[in-house]
Image (spheres, helix red, strand yellow):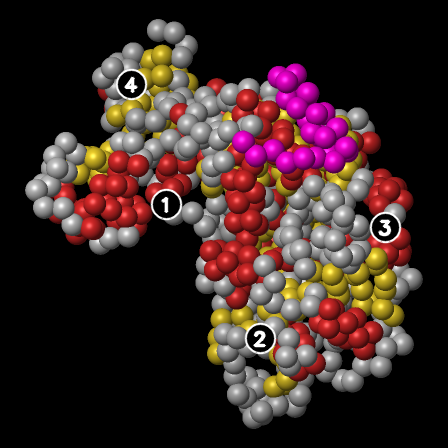
């Protein structure tokens, strides 16, 4: 027996996706199995999916060990994938079974290849020819014997499906069974390259050379919004395809994928494979299988696309790398940007981190010489960076209950007269963030969370943005029963929509917010309509700050630029800086210069001043110095521990005990802060307590945390989540 093949009856250790903390021993099935094989094994009365992870231990009665039921008909898990899952589990302190769940999130992997009926030209000629029949046969002849599904043939010929079925009976069209999971069409790296500007061409050549080195490396591709970063990294994708390796492009938002897929198709002649929550289960299974067989050259996807079984991964692009949605905040707590770097290092692949406003972590890695920095300094074509100015809200004449200042209103009117688009940005979903009783002062909160409910007037409901609970808008106060005294306080995007429509009754106003769409497809369609000029004024949340290109947009107004500067989040200044720069960058993407106006009550605040001056380097240097002095990321290590239980006493007791028994952490010089109630102390009926661990950059934090947490037995209903490098502190 070699190390990588197990003969029938040999003991194998199988990792399953079930919540068990160890490998399970089984006997290899008839015909044997390879290391990494996907197998179906019996577990109690059930059959479950697993992966052969190594030799079995054989540490109990061999007679009781059951056999693997069968080896699945999919490519075995490669060694680099097993190493990646193991190292990601060690870094994030996640059980291996949960990591395997991430790597097998395609339905029906254990099922035989499903089949579908396809149609091609038959060998008979019908005795009686009609127009409809001629159209069908003409289409099949034109495509030289290619096969199509029933719907495709009928649609291309412009006839009903019954015409095609009639021709099958006559033998003029042949009906065959074919596998549903077919390879993706070949992308052509030389199909549609665009003329690049001088600094784009130089950047593209640098990335191509890095790929040709066939080694691991990470490049931070920084460029002002609209400088053509996408065109540059698509040239790197083209080089990767020429080398016969697979490429992955990660996007932060599913809403961005429609526009991006069109750009990929224009560049390579065909559509790539897609992996995100908006694709069907059938497409997911096809993508998973084809990636493993090497029949998908390019995958465009959300963060979980990192866990697909690539056969020969050569390039990972993380677009908008600063975006907080790359951090998964439930289940396995990982940051896709960091995991992309880990995966590429194991595979000897290149990583491109693209952003106009990089994260401080990436900036620090460039400063430390770990990443290469590549900068695009000018906007592509005739476009120039927008002019930025602050509107000092302390001197504006604002009637009660309004949020658009006279200065911003005048600027919007000018744009309307010229037939240009304006964007009003407010980082609050819904109609109003607080619903208050004017009789007793009660604020309506969620029944299951310590969070205020947000009014969504389009839905005629109140919604909790923590747990998703909704309830109808009440007519009387739940606290004092006063009728008609409930008042919406503060603006959300829906309320801004009302105000803007009242100010400009003839303008076409669109509100863009992720919770206003039933599906990702509906959202994509609306965004495309706006880009084509179907709207005069767009009102949006964070969704609009991410990568969209609206050519007619020349004015951006930010309603509450100070919103992110409050609170205790160590990244508050960085997030505000990034968000404002990203939003402002939506303006003036074509020939007409743009303008960005920030409404603020603190125009002298250092962050607001840095945004207006566009002096990123001095902002980063100052922010870095502050973080260094405090010993916090990226110049120190942090971990958040969240304890939650329906029993409030239980979580505080365990939190206090953990703070007392911090020996393993003290040994590495780490400090424990807390326990304290989490800022949102109750979510879905569970009370939440946080502890924060802070350590030196070089401290072996994970081992110490594992040792520390391993001292405690958790009561049945108490959960502990350990978040390495926390991004949010709620």
Who's the residue at 38% across and 42% down the image?
283
N-term-proximal mark, 2 vs 1: 1
Residue 450 in which image quadrant: bottom right
Who's the residue at 63% across and 52% down the image?
548
State which mark lies toward you, 2 or 4: 2
Question: From what the image shows, is residue 101 above or below residue 562?
Answer: above
Who's the residue at 69% across and 39% down the image?
229
Determine which residue is flagged by label 2: 455
Q: How busy is the neighbourhood of tag 3: few (under 14 within 10 Å), some, or many (20 plus)?
A: some
- Label 2 – label 1 distance at C-alpha: 34 Å
Who's the residue at 58% across and 65% down the image?
534
Residue 252: tell me if it is visible.
yes
State which mark lies toward you, 2 or 1: 1
Residue 573: tell me if it is visible.
no
- Label 3 – label 1 distance at C-alpha: 45 Å
Determine which residue is flagged by label 1: 281
Q: How busy is the neighbourhood of tag 4: few (under 14 within 10 Å), some, or many (20 plus)?
A: many
Checking the image for residue 614, the label placed there is: 3
Checking the image for residue 530, the label placed there is: none
């Amino acid at each position: 027996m070699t190390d990588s093949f197990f003969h029938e009856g040999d003991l194998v250790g199988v990792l399953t996706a079930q919540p068990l903390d160890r490998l399970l021993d089984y006997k290899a099935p008839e015909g044997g199995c390879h290391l990494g094989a996907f197998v179906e094994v019996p577990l109690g009365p059930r059959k479950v999916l697993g992966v052969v992870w190594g030799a079995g231990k054989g540490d109990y009665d061999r007679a009781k060990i059951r056999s693997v039921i069968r080896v699945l008909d999919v490519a075995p898990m490669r060694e680099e994938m097993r190493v990646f899952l193991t190292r990601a589990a060690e870094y994030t302190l996640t059980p291996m079974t949960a990591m395997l769940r991430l790597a097998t999130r395609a339905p029906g992997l254990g099922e035989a290849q499903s089949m579908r009926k396809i149609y091609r030209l038959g060998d008979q000629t019908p005795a009686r020819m009609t127009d409809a029949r001629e159209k069908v046969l003409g289409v099949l002849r034109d495509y030289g014997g290619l096969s199509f599904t029933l719907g495709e043939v009928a649609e291309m010929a412009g006839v009903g499906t019954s015409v095609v079925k009639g021709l099958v009976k006559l033998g003029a069209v042949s009906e065959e069974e074919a596998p549903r999971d077919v390879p993706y069409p070949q992308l052509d790296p030389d199909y549609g390259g665009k003329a690049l500007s001088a600094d784009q061409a130089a950047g593209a050549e640098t990335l191509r050379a890095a790929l040709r080195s066939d080694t691991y490396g990470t490049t931070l591709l920084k460029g002002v919004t609209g400088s053509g970063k996408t065109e540059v990294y698509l040239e790197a994708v083209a080089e990767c395809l020429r080398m016969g390796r697979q490429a992955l492009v990660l996007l932060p938002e599913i809403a961005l994928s429609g526009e991006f897929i069109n750009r990929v198709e224009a560049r390579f002649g065909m559509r790539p494979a897609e992996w995100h929550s908006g694709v069907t289960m059938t497409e997911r299974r096809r993508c998973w299988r084809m990636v493993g067989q090497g029949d998908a050259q390019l995958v465009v996807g959300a963060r979980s696309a990192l866990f697909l079984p690539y056969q020969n991964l050569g390039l990972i692009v993380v677009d908008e790398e600063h975006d907080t949605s790359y951090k998964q905040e439930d289940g396995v707590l990982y940051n896709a940007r960091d995991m992309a770097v880990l995966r590429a290092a194991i595979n000897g692949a290149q990583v491109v981190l693209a952003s106009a406003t990089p994260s401080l972590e990436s900036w620090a890695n460039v400063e430390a010489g770990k990443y290469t920095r590549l900068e695009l300094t000018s906007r592509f074509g005739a476009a120039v960076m927008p002019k930025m100015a602050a509107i000092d809200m302390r001197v504006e004449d604002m009637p009660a209950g309004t949020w658009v200042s006279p200065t911003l209103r005048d600027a919007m009117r000018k744009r309307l007269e010229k037939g240009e688009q304006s964007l009003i940005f407010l980082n609050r979903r819904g109609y109003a963030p607080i619903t208050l009783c004017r009789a007793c002062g009660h604020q309506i909160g969620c029944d299951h969370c310590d969070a205020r409910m947000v009014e969504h007037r389009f839905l005629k409901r109140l919604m909790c943005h923590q747990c998703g609970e909704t309830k109808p808008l009440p007519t009387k106060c739940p606290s004092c029963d006063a009728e008609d005294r409930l008042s919406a306080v503060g603006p959300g995007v829906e309320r801004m929509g009302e105000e803007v429509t009242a100010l400009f009754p003839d303008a076409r106003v669109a509100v863009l917010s992720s919770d206003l769409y039933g599906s990702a497809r509906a959202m994509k369609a609306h965004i495309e309509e706006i880009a084509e000029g179907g709207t005069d004024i767009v009102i949006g949340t964070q969704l609009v700050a991410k990568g969209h290109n609206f050519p007619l947009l020349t004015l951006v107004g930010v309603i509450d630029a100070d919103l992110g500067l409050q609170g205790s989040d160590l990244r508050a200044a960085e997030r505000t800086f990034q968000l404002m720069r990203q939003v402002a960058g939506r303006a003036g993407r074509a020939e007409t210069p743009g303008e960005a106006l920030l409404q603020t009550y603190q125009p002298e605040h250092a962050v607001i001043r840095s945004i207006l001056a566009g002096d990123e380097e001095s902002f980063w240097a100052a922010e870095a110095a502050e973080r260094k002095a405090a010993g916090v990321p990226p110049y120190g290590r942090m971990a958040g521990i969240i304890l939650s239980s329906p029993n409030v006493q239980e979580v505080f007791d365990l939190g206090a005990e953990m703070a007392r028994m911090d020996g393993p952490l003290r040994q590495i010089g780490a400090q424990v802060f807390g326990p304290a109630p989490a800022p949102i102390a109750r979510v879905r009926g569970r009370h939440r307590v946080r502890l924060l661990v802070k350590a030196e950059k070089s401290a072996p934090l994970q081992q110490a945390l594992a040792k520390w947490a391993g001292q405690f037995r958790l009561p049945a209903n108490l959960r502990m989540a350990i978040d390495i490098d926390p991004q949010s502190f709620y």
